[in-house]
Image: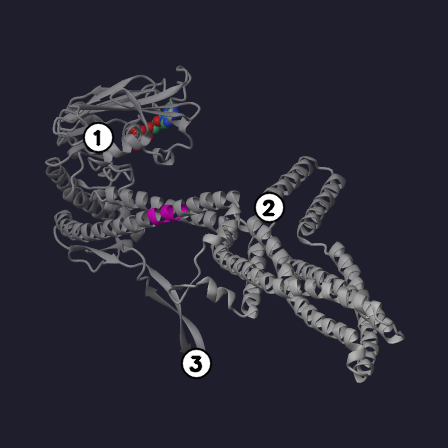
Amino acid sequence: MYLKHLTIGGFKSFAKKGELEFSAPITAIVGPNGSGKSNVAESFRFVLGEQSVKGMRAKKGADLIFNGSDSTSRGNKASVSVVLDNTQRVFPVDFDEIVLERTVHRDGQNEYLINNSKVRLKDVQELLSAANIGPTGHHIISQGEADRILSASAKERREMIEDALGLKVFQYKKIEAEKKLKKTSENVEKVQSLRREVAPHLRFLERQVKKIERSIALRGELTTVYSEYLKREDTYIAHHSDRLKLERTEPSQKLEDLKVQLTRAKEVLSESENDEKSGELVSLEEQISAVRAERQTLLRKSGQLEGQVGFLERRIRQAQEKSTSESEAPIPIGEVKKVLSEIERQVDKAVQSSDASLLQRALSDVVHTFKKFVQNASGVVVISTDTEEKELKEIAKELQENEKDIVDLSVKEEKLSGQYEALKTSIEAESQESREAEREVFRIVGEQRECENLISRIDSELSVLERDRNEFKRELQEAVTLIGSGASQYFGFEIVTDGEVVSNEVIVAEERSVQRERRRELEKMKIRLEELGGANEDIEKEYKEVKERDEFLVHEIADLETSIEKLEALIKELTDQLNEQFVAGIDKIGAEFNRFFALMFGGGEAKLMRVKPKIKRKKKGEDEFGEEIEIDEEVEDEEAQEGIELSVKLPNKKVTGLDMLSGGERALTSIALIFAMSQINPPLFIILDETDAALDEANSRRYGDMIEALAQKSQLILITHNRETMSRAGILYGVTMGGDGVSKLLSVKFDEAAAVAK
Ligand code: ATP
């Protein structure tokens, strides 16, 4: 016997402590109407954790506490405790005896104790569910409630039967799993939304980091291209400069000699009988030399000016190309953060104030701050070329003037040369002897011109090289700024083409246009590099952090999705188990129901049927005129869970519907079903509150027989007025209520009990 003892104190009409021992398989509680018998049944519901106060015939928790009478004052709390035997460990705790206690206070607060330790309601429910004592209370049938199983809907009936079959454990687990599934799905959505929120920033950082990576790669590439370019340039300039200087020595030397010779020849000429022609010759020669010298100086100047023009033009072009890529210009993240905190400060201030005008001002402040930021940010990248353009203009003007002077000098030289040639022809036409000295001058001047021409050609080549050298120096400086001091190590760089190291001989013999093309490529690379910007540790660090967080979230989503899969599998498994055991249980209960029914009625037939709920559906049909219309049709809802319907057939009667049964017949049918339910998975105890009220003498006997059969498997507590039922009980308790409105419990003899029986 599992149910040992019940103590009621302050519960409903039991103002004083009352105790019941359950030492027999069947205990009957008897007493006059209104004495408090049903309150005993409800005290069981209460201590077992019933949450519906309505189910205990009350409106609120405080109604369960003794409310006082004319002679007895009301109580502050109601307590009920029940002692259960656990020597067979039906409850999964290591105690031989379990004492459950529940107390309710006037403020509606509840306390639960298991073996004197405070616990939660959930702990009580879990403990009881292990012994199939479920919350629907299928083992406690209150007064008039037996009929409920007949009047219940197919769905409610299923729940009662599931409870009786001990399937509630699966239901709990399923509900728990479904809750977890919902929570997990919500969490997936939350984490996904976190990812979505951070995604644009991550994409931005990704682009920035890719840019940085491209910039690093390009810098590496640029180092190689630079090294090759610088090496080639330096080698070429050095070699050709040396060569030209060498080539220049001979004509220079010769020119010096010729100068001496000319001085001497001119002296000879002046010593001889000096005529007009020879004087003119000397004068012309000197004038031409002076003009030539001047023109040479101007030509050199032109060379320098051209060099400067080229340099300035390139600078301006680069600046313009940079400016066109302004939309791609990076803005330092520090600047953006500064603006953000400023805007946040303004908005916070505005949010704290409820004044509309302050809000308006704050909004315009925000717009102003942002505008200023954009202006400043644009200023950073707009490159001004004003100074260069001005300088270019001035130099171009100077060059133009210089060129004009050169042209003037050329004209002058040409004119003088014309005179000189005419004079030369005229002198040469005269007798050889008399013009020996002049002819000497002509020879020397002629050779001088040749030498000068040669030197001038060499010089102009040298001046180009000089210009290139200056450019080279500037380029080297730029290279150091761009790629670091390593750029000046270019000389050790080995240029390899088609797997072979390119020799200096090949380098110096190369067409200049090829090197110029290299230079153009270099310029393009520099612009690209500048557009990409340099390394930015902050960005890289931030990217790493954001990326790691995102990866963490991805991982989390994967984990959550695995949990979802597992939960779905668990739910499916539980549903399958539930359905399987339910179907098997229904078959067994159905068979028992039929047996009990036949016993009760001395024949007949009763069945349990699994049915799907019906739903209404529209279908196409025709009206009386043959017009197409939509008509309603009832079909089974395939998706829904099956419910349980009953069908009964009384012996010798044509009655099949439950509605056509008499009160007594309904009582017998419901008793048959309740008994059938308790046969399959017998509860530890069953409390029946006047289930037998409607039975006549013959049926009371049958009922008594069945009770005895039932008591083989479950302990019974029967609240009854029925003499036959009382006679089957091992223990009888009487409940009385005196004028003080307080219920009292006492042990009674059968005869005493029978006195209150019908
Ligand atoms: P019946 O045989 O007619 O079914 P019963 O013996 O089952 O009667 P109960 O329904 O258990 O009687 O008891 C009802 C009595 O309990 C009523 O007199 C009611 O006033 C009393 N009662 C219910 N709640 C309280 C309460 N909170 N305080 C005091 N008395 C209460």
Q: Residue at x 22, y 44 (%)?
A: 167
Q: CA distance from mark 1 to mark 2?
A: 97 Å
Mark 1 secondary-structure assignment: loop
Q: Residue at x 22, y 57 (%)?
A: 609
Instruction: Choose the circle earlier in sequence order: 1 or 2.
Output: 2
**Quadrant of residue 631 in the image?**
bottom left
Secondary structure that dominates the magenta span: helix
**Residue 554 highlighted magenta (yes or no):** yes
Q: Is mark 2 within 8 Å of ligand 1?
A: no
The label shown at residue 624 is 3
Mark 3 secondary-structure assignment: loop
The label shown at residue 25 is none
Q: Position of residue 44 (x, y in %)?
A: 27, 29
Instruction: Choose the circle earlier in sequence order: 3 or 1.
Output: 3
Foreground pick, 31 / 578: 578
Magenta-drawn segment: 553-559
Q: Amino acid at mark 1?
A: Ala
**Residue 458 highlighted magenta (yes or no):** no
Q: Position of residue 10 (x, y in %)?
A: 34, 20
- Give the label, 3 or 2, closer to the camera: 2
Does 355 sit left or right of 195 as displayed?
Answer: right
Residue under label 1, please give it: 757
Tell me which image quadrant ligand 1 sits in: top left
Reply above or below: 105 against 286. Answer: above
